[in-house]
Amino acid sequence: MKKIHLFVILLFGIGTAKSQELHIGDMLPNITVRKTVPAIKAVVQTADYKDKLLIINFWAINCGACIAAMPRIDSLQQHFGNQIKILPVIAEEEDRVNALWKKNRNTKNLSLFTVVDDNLLLSGYFPHKSVPHEVWVHKGKVVAITSEDEVTAANIETVLAGKQVDLPLKDDFGGRFDGATKPIKDTASIAGTDPSVMLKYVMLSKYKPAIKPGAIMNENRGGISKDVARRSVRAYVINQPIYTTYLWALFNAQRMDWLKTVHAIVDFEPNRIVWEVNDQSKYKYDKALSWDEWNRRNAICYESLNPDTGQTDQQVYHQIAKDLNDLLGLDVHFEKRKLKTLVLTRTGQADLLKTKNEGIDPSYNSYKEGHFFRLRNAGIAAFVKEFNQYQGNAFAIDGSGYTIKVDMDLNIPSWTDLANVKKELNKYGLGFKEEIREVEVLVFSETGGGYRKPTK
């Protein structure tokens, strides 16, 4: 399954006792914790880890990304052993956390324990509005405050080696840039406050550290702003991947509403992209780097200002895509191509699919456990969707005609091993039939001299 980068916004924030707030370079005082899940006999004190790397992992019960990350974080703890201590911390009450910890597949087998009922004890020193929120304390000193993406073996090794660490700061309070009301380009110094001065421009820049990245579906990160007084239309994108920016512009140009655009961007299948480029990692997130580091290297900012001639929003979004093509040396567009497709079909009459788990919690309908892909009371389309997340696979469509909810347990070490996938499907009376079908694809082509990366 593709990794989707989500975080939970905590409406009132966590830890607002600003007088005791700690920053990078500050020393962490000794803090005593008495409630943990699972319960441990010893009193936990932060001073116990003064000679180690302590990573405080703030999380929340309603944060799916936090919970999904727990097995990975636990494996890091086991890998580094006594050199580090990863300490999950949560504000919720002991009973609620204990119930989740014992039953959830991501937490029930962990070697870690979590601090519960924090009540501003630790979070008071490290205020934040969203989780996961990671605080790195090496030999008693705060050396980094980051997102969960930065908690990697490579970064841990850097800190343990005593080398200087330069990780992106996660600051939930300061430095926010409101793209909906403030232009990226300093137009005030050119036009002043005189509404009769008409400006027109289009600009593209590389990642701007002073502007915090966020989801492009948020109007602070991308959108259209109209100035009635100046009779102008401004379009903008702030610190976004080129791939996501194109999808955002192209889907909005199709008159989609906000929610449909979100789903279209998140769910767009990687094997429906035709890459005619030298290095696609410049355009779309590459997991070789953390999300923040990749974004710093490759994200762009775009802004255009044009007279308001009555153009529709769809026309503005079309123009954004055209501007991007012109400025970046690309030709990105949707088109229909005849491709080899895999049509999921039933190979027998026996019903080996019908669910025995009606009424199961929807959040457990589709999930992975090691090599196993499990469906419980789910639509068979969930399998097709997962298969299409792997770029090397031919595009698959559901032609089974099976509309009843299903249960399936598929042992699939590699989703691009088609022979094994077919073998697993055969257990349930299913198979793939190869056909040539017309499929709408996203074509990503470099034109002329190739990709022109912004330099300013």
Image (spheres, rainbow, N blue to C red):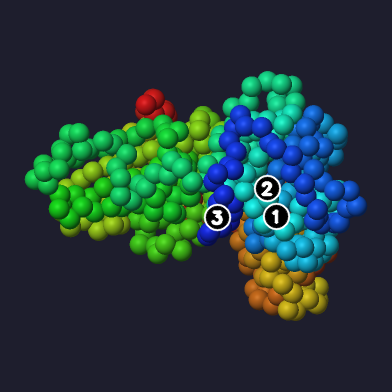
Nearest to the observer: residue 167 or residue 201: 167
The picture quadrant where one finds residue 448 is top left
Nearer mark to the viewer, of 3 and 1: 1
* Residue highlighted by disc 1: 118
Residue 37 image position (x, y, % from top left): 82, 57
Residue at (70%, 43%) from the top-left corner? Answer: 56
The kind of residue on which mark 3 rests is Gly
Q: Which residue lies furthest to the left in this view?
A: 196
Residue 137 in view (yes/no): yes
| Residue depicted at x 89% and y 48% | 42
Label 3 environment density (alpha carbons within 10 Å; few <14, some 14–19, many ≥20): some
Tell me: 148 left or right of 234: right
- Count the marks: 3
**Is disc 1 in contact with disc 2, using a CB cutoff of under 8 Å?**
yes
Which residue is tagged 3? 13
Q: Secondary structure under badge 3?
A: strand
Residue pictured at 39% horizontal, 29% vertical: 454
